[in-house]
Image (cartoon, grey):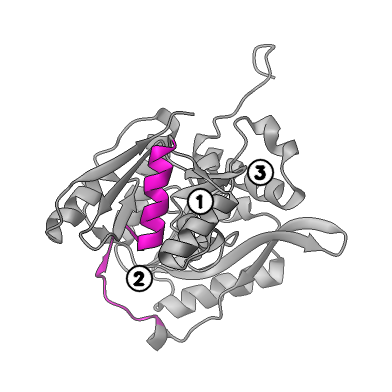
């Protein structure tokens, strides 16, 4: 209660992160958590807590000399003491040039590129530790006060390696976030250049056809047998496969018997061969199109919740 009224937390960021991880619609209000399945509810609650928690940074001096050493030490501590709650893990741990970064969406959401429902809770990085401090703090300020920070975003991306993964599930008679560590790799397998580049989600011909139908239906793609037959006839692709491909872009989610965008604004570029690209980040999409000499002829899907 706040001033005699029920407290309603801002779950905007948590809703978006939940939909990106699961491909499902998040509750509009926190009380809607009771309408989710037990597993989805556990994940959603953790994401809400992460979006509201303060930033916590551990800055070590003259610490671990390798990325693998820092990863091993973190895994050993967690396995010996146990992970009571994901909320107890710091937002950022720095040791010399190496970092452990929490993938809670502030600013980086840790996603498995090949599997839904898996959350990369912690990943390691080996470049730009000072920059990461600034990005974490700025992101929290931006989210809390709804202010745009001077990111000067380009196409450069930090190159992270997953360390701790989680997935909501049942262990014996209890539901919880089940966590496991990525197989700790030797240092020689972690070495990589600082040249990771952002790019939009790539879409095949069948997915682009589905998006065009989605646009014609006001932003909602119907999941019905007629559309399934049409996709099979035209592109030898089932509606289920196309829907899952759209969901795995982390830009679309299933809403009842429809697929629709997660973000209020989604930008799509169609190429001459009827394939395309999509993104919710207009500034970066502009830069990427310019660099790849692709005209910025966007189809924009705009939805207001």
Disc ID at residue 126: 2
Q: Looking at the image, do the residues carrying marks 3 and 1 touch, with CB atoms under 8 Å apart?
A: no
Q: Which residue is mark 3?
A: 45
Residue 50: percent from the left, percent from the top? Answer: 56, 45
Q: What separation in Å lies between label 3 and label 1 (alpha carbons)?
A: 15 Å
Q: What separation in Å lies between label 2 and label 3 (alpha carbons)?
A: 31 Å
Q: Is residue 105 above or below residue 168?
A: above
Q: Secondary structure at mark 1?
A: helix
Q: Is residue 222 visible?
A: yes
- Residue pictured at 72% horizontal, 53% vertical: 39
Q: Find the magenta span and give its range.
A: 190-217
Direction from residue 89 to residue 196 in the image, left or right: left
**Could you say which is closer to the camera, residue 116 or residue 13?**
116
Looking at marks 2 and 1 on the same chain, the residue that comes earlier in the sequence is marked by: 1
Direction from residue 100 to residue 199 in the image, left or right: left
Disc ID at residue 20: 1
Give the label, 3 or 1, closer to the camera.
Answer: 1
**Could you say which is closer to the camera, residue 230 or residue 80?**
230
Q: Is residue 197 magenta?
A: yes
Q: Secondary structure at mark 3?
A: helix
Q: Looking at the image, do the residues carrying marks 2 and 3 touch, with CB atoms under 8 Å apart?
A: no
Q: Give the number of callouts.
A: 3
Disc ID at residue 30: none
Residue 24: percent from the left, percent from the top? Answer: 59, 47
- Residue pictured at 46% horizontal, 87% vertical: 186
**Is the residue marked by circle 3 packed among few (<14), some (14-19), or many (20+) residues within 10 Å?**
some
């Amino acid at each position: 209660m706040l001033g005699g009224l029920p407290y309603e937390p801002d779950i905007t960021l948590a809703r978006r992160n939940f939909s990106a991880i699961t491909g499902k619609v998040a509750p509009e209000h926190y009380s809607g958590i009771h309408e989710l399945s037990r597993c989805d509810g556990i994940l959603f609650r953790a994401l809400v807590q992460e979006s509201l928690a303060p930033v916590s940074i551990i800055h070590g001096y003259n610490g671990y000399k390798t990325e693998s050493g820092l990863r091993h030490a973190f895994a050993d501590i967690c396995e010996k003491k146990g992970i009571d709650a994901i909320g107890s893990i710091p937002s950022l741990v720095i040791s010399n040039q190496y970092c452990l970064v929490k993938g809670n969406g502030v600013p980086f959401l840790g996603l498995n590129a090949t599997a839904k429902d898996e959350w990369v809770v912690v990943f390691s990085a080996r470049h730009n530790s000072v920059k990461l401090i600034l990005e974490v703090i700025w992101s929290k300020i931006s989210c809390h006060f709804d202010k745009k920070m001077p990111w000067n975003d380009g196409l450069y991306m930090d190159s992270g390696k997953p360390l701790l993964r989680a997935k909501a599930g049942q262990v014996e008679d209890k539901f919880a976030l089940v966590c496991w560590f990525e197989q700790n790799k030797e240092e020689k397998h972690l070495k990589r250049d600082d040249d990771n580049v952002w790019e939009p989600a790539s879409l095949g011909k069948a997915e682009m056809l589905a998006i065009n139908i989605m646009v014609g239906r006001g932003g909602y793609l119907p999941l019905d047998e007629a559309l399934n037959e049409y996709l099979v006839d035209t592109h030898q692709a089932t509606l289920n496969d196309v829907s899952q491909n759209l969901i795995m872009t982390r830009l679309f989610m299933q809403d009842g018997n429809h697929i629709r965008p997660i973000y209020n604004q989604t930008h799509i570029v169609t190429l001459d061969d009827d394939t395309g690209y999509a993104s919710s980040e207009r500034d970066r999409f502009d830069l990427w199109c310019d660099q790849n000499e692709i005209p910025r002829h966007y189809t924009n899907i705009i939805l207001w919740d």
